[in-house]
Amino acid sequence: MIRSAVRGIGRALPERAMSNAEFETIVETSDEWIVQRTGIRQRYIANENETTASLGEAAARNALDSAGLTPADIDLIVLATSTPNNTFPATAVEIQHRLGMHHGAAFDVQAVCTGFIYAITTADLYIRGGMARRVLVIGAETFSRILDWTDRTTCVLFGDGAGAVVLEAVEGVGLTSDTGILAAKLRSDGDHREKLYVDGGPSSTQTVGHLRMQGREVFKHAVGMITDVIEDSFSVAGITSDQIDWFVPHQANRRIIDASARKLGIPGDKVVMTVDRHGNTSAASVPLALSVAVEDGRIKSGDLILLEAMGGGFTWGAVLLRW
Ligand code: UT7
């Protein structure tokens, strides 16, 4: 059977890191509150020349380099983003142009913080369905552009960045020892759409709008939703949590990550945590964290990896893959 394996990975961050201390001069907050409630110490903020497309392109080029491939080898680009350069065309098409690609296809996927999980699951289906052999899957965001910089309950939480993987068709035998994606589960429930949303859009207000979040409400649902969808993915794959080598969760809040890992019985030394350095980068957070753990040598060939995310919609999902 065909499996989708990760052949290359890359990331890109804006030049400027912004510390918690800098927020103390903008809104009524403190480094102590931010660290204690979220685990965030700094995040990266795009300058006027850095966009979702430019960060996505840079991450994509790094992923292609690490795979030893060029844009000519790619059949499809799937970009997860909620902060596109323009309402249309899809920012994936802008990245396709920047990569000098005139073949294949490119489109955006919009599932907010769960975007990368939706995008890699979509790419996996294209590969297993035989419509693509190699897919560039990118998560790229510039959430700084949709933040209300006077709202301390949201502006301290988010950052900008991009991560990308090259997924490639490989032969598997249908066992959990196969390399590549072993299981994926996606969920959404629009009843929760007003707990985390942007108060603008082309068809409603004709403005871009700002991010609004009832943080405590999101927090209340997060751990249960995350662990439920992960357990669904375990039962699809026939895997138990003690078999996981690395848990690479969405990086929104250290307390949510710790509580989810505890509930699943995954020890802290198997959890990849980058929320301290990156803040919440929405659809970029999982591939950014993955790329850090691959680069520093924690994730090795053959490791069983659990990816997870939850965000606006609500959307949530999990992917199990063997590196
Ligand atoms: O990625 C998509 C998914 N998003 C998430 O997963 C976010 C989920 N939510 C969270 O991570 C947390 O709810 C937050 C980090 C957003 C907030 O933490 P919390 O422990 O739930 O705090 P809270 O909202 O209950 O607020 C506690 C207090 C409030 O003051 P009062 O009402 O107790 O007087 C807030 O006004 O903290 C206050 N507060 C702040 N204080 C200093 C809120 N933001 C700040 C701030 N600095 N930046």
Image: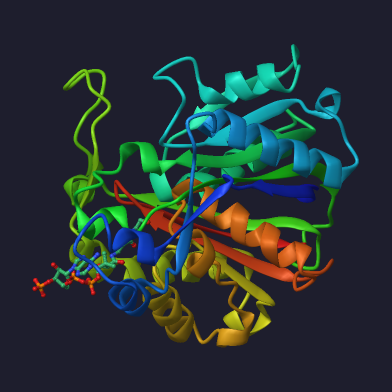
- Front residue of this view, candidates 24 and 177: 24
* Whether residue 40 is visible: yes
Q: What residue appears at the point 49 percent right and 69 percent down from the top-left corner?
A: 276
* Whether residue 4 is visible: no
- Front residue of this view, candidates 127 and 167: 167
**Relative to residue 190, is residue 231 drawn left or right?**
right
Report x, y in % for residue 151: 19, 52
Report x, y in % for residue 192: 21, 51
Report x, y in % for residue 156: 32, 58
Query: Which color mode does the image show?
Result: rainbow
Q: Is residue 2 above or below residue 36?
A: above
Furthest residue to the right?
Answer: 68
Quadrant occupied by the C terminus: bottom right
Report x, y in % for residue 19: 44, 62
Q: What residue appears at the point 23 percent right and 32 percent down from the top-left corner?
A: 209
Q: Quadrant of residue 182?
A: bottom right
Furthest residue to the top?
Answer: 102
Q: Is residue 242 above or below residue 139?
A: below
Q: Is residue 234 above or below residue 313?
A: below
Q: Is residue 144 above or below residue 293?
A: above
Q: Quadrant of ligand 1?
A: bottom left
**Relative to residue 186, is residue 243 drawn left or right?**
right
Q: What residue appears at the point 57 percent right and 34 percent down from the top-left corner?
A: 79
**Relative to residue 174, is residue 40 drawn left or right?**
left
- Front residue of this view, candidates 7 and 42: 42
